[in-house]
Image (cartoon, helix red, strand yellow):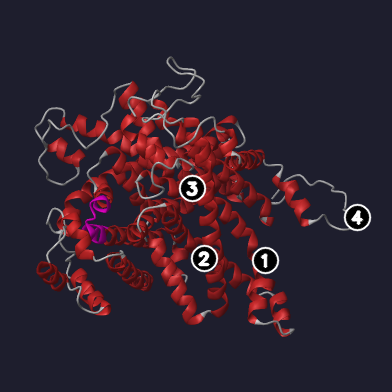
Amino acid sequence: MLRFVLTRVSLIIPTFLGVTLLAFLLVHLIPGDPIETMAGEHGIDPARHAQLRAEYGFDKPLLVQYGIYIGHVLRGDLGISAITHQRVTEEFFSLFPATVELTICAMLFAVLLGLPAGIIAAVRRNTIFDHGIMGISLTGYSMPIFWWGLLLILLFSGVLGWTPVSGRVDAAIFVDTHTGFLLIDSLLSDEDGAFRSAVSHLILPTIVLGTVPLAIIARMTRSAMLEVLGEDYIRTARAKGLSPVWVVCVHALRNALIPVITVIGLQMGSLFAGAILTETIFSWPGVGHWVVEAINRRDYPVLQGGVLMLGSVVMLVNLIVDLLYGVVNPRIRHTR
Amino acid sequence: MTAEVETVPVAVGAPPHPLVEFWHYFSQNKGALGGLLTILTLVLLAVFADVISPHSPILNHDDAFLKPPAWQEGGSWTYPLGTDPIGRDLLSRLIHGTRYSLFMGTVVVSLSLFAGTFLGLVAGFLRGVPEIAIMRLMDTLLTLPSLLLAIVIVAILGPGLINAVFAVAITTLPYYVRITRAAVITERAKDYVTASQVAGAGMFRLMFSTVLPNCMAPLIVQATLGFSTAILDAAALGFLGLGVQPPLPEWGTMLADSREFVLRAWWVVTFPGVAILVTVMAFNLLGDGLRDALDPKLKR
């Protein structure tokens, strides 16, 4: 097991270096002088320009600059925002809980609906349930989620007036930050209706972000279940007289879950990408929204740091999923 | 595994041509046929967009801001699907939009298919250092979520149609490299490749003429499904203002332009999304159908 963990962890190092190189090149490949770009239309006087060049280290050779950059990254220094003049890491960690909260809710939504839907489709194969669920699933994973978000706003906020359009909580409600997770913080706070408001703000973004993983999980569960249900041991269990529900939900599901867990793990990473679109639509104050804003404002330190941090988070999540998978499935642990 | 055993009349004479056999399996899949038909219709719409559209997709009509569709009160058949906030005919913009989506899908898939197959062949044949270098690079590209990577590339290159296409092509590249490499490694161990090598075939002949044709099936499927990813990601970039720039009628860009009117004019938000959804679904259906038809394991 230790060997398995060490192999997986060591595999991450070249990938991490690759991501730092990409983030580093991001600033250096942008056409034009980076300082003039950041200064904007107002221009900048030559003395200050030279001073800033030296300050940012742009006057050194590229390889040296990369070395310096890696040194800064390893010390946890990702620079200072060109707009707000706050540390990039500080901004990231103040916004990150909002993204995590949204991502976790979306994944729960996808798993809680996707698993049963896939099981029903497999058990009732080639019936109207199966075709219906698979049709919805096809629509789900073909869905442009930025449009799906707008449609839901149109229906639930516009026509029905049930949910708010944007943000995490009503502007009139002030919630003290303890954990950064608004669902927990609002429960702890004394404000009336804070929790209700937080939940109602969370519903639409959760559905939007969870739709694609939901569709993929339902599809994967169906095909894994179909494969397992044809096995001999299932026939044996049925022949023993076990109840059909017990056979499906205990005997079959346990083995069908292995590929499904892989898919869930893979989806965790792409959820962070989906969060970029979802947060933009709902003005959700998370890191995805922050990165898009950074592009629009040409705030390159934030963009660079944001890409590096998001990339690292995805790598970390994938690593954890890989390790957990090794715990769940001994066959994985003992290969290589 | 199957319970019933049928007596199948033994085929006499030559086996059917591979294409005939392929069509036999493919045409049994109603969804895939529907997808193919939809795609053909979209191609026709794109080719004849100038003839079919009732109006220009760019010119605005000063007398018709945010007109609702014809069947709703206040609408007229002059603008069958209504007009957008600055008075352009929505139907004409949607029809012209098929050009951008299909063009971007085609270029993205061709770029990543050719580059990916080549890199995959190199990695699978040369092994050693080139393989490690290529596969580590692909791992890095795969680590970043595709949309984030595309955003980074567009941030470097600047927004626009060509740059967006380039960005999306790079994000989909690793899939083709991985598929090709895996297929090449399996094929290379087979006797027919050794025979060809013994007969004196050179490296390039082995790569492109002996091994590659036998790796095509998964690549064709991936390329078809790649169309849907490409169209979705390109539209997402357009929506974020990083893809095709206004006033060009790209569907994602149209959605971005109409965002603030979501609560006032449902049609400007609804129709471009329907267009994206239908196109992406068609390619997904076709891709699934191709996979079933080309996978010998699934043939009954």
Residue at 40% x, 55% y: name it.
B146
Task: Verify CB contact (< 8 Å) between mark 3 and mark 2.
Answer: no
Q: Quadrant of residue A313?
A: bottom left
Q: Is residue A74 above or below residue B263?
A: below
Q: Amino acid at mark 2?
A: Arg
Instruction: For mark 2, name the chain.
Output: B
Residue topped by disc 2: B178
Q: Residue furthest right?
A: B12
Q: Residue furthest top?
A: B73
- Label for residue B12? 4
Looking at the image, how many numbered discs can be counted on the residues?
4
Q: Is residue A304 magenta?
A: yes
Q: Quadrant of residue B143?
A: bottom left
- Mark earlier in primary sequence (3, 2): 2
Residue at 24% x, 53% y: name it.
A294
Instruction: Please provide percent x and percent y for residue B76.
Output: 48, 18
- Mark earlier in primary sequence (2, 4): 4
Instruction: Please provide percent x and percent y for residue B201.
Output: 70, 82
Residue topped by disc 3: B231
Q: Amino acid at mark 4?
A: Val
Instruction: State the CA–CA distance, disc 2 to disc 4.
Output: 40 Å
Q: Nearer the viewer, mark 4 or mark 1?
A: 1
The secondary element bearing badge 2 is classed as helix
Instruction: State the CA–CA distance, disc 1 to disc 2.
Output: 15 Å
Instruction: State the CA–CA distance, disc 3 to disc 2.
Output: 22 Å
Label 3: how many Cα within 10 Å (few below 14, some 14–19, many 20+): many
Residue topped by disc 1: B214
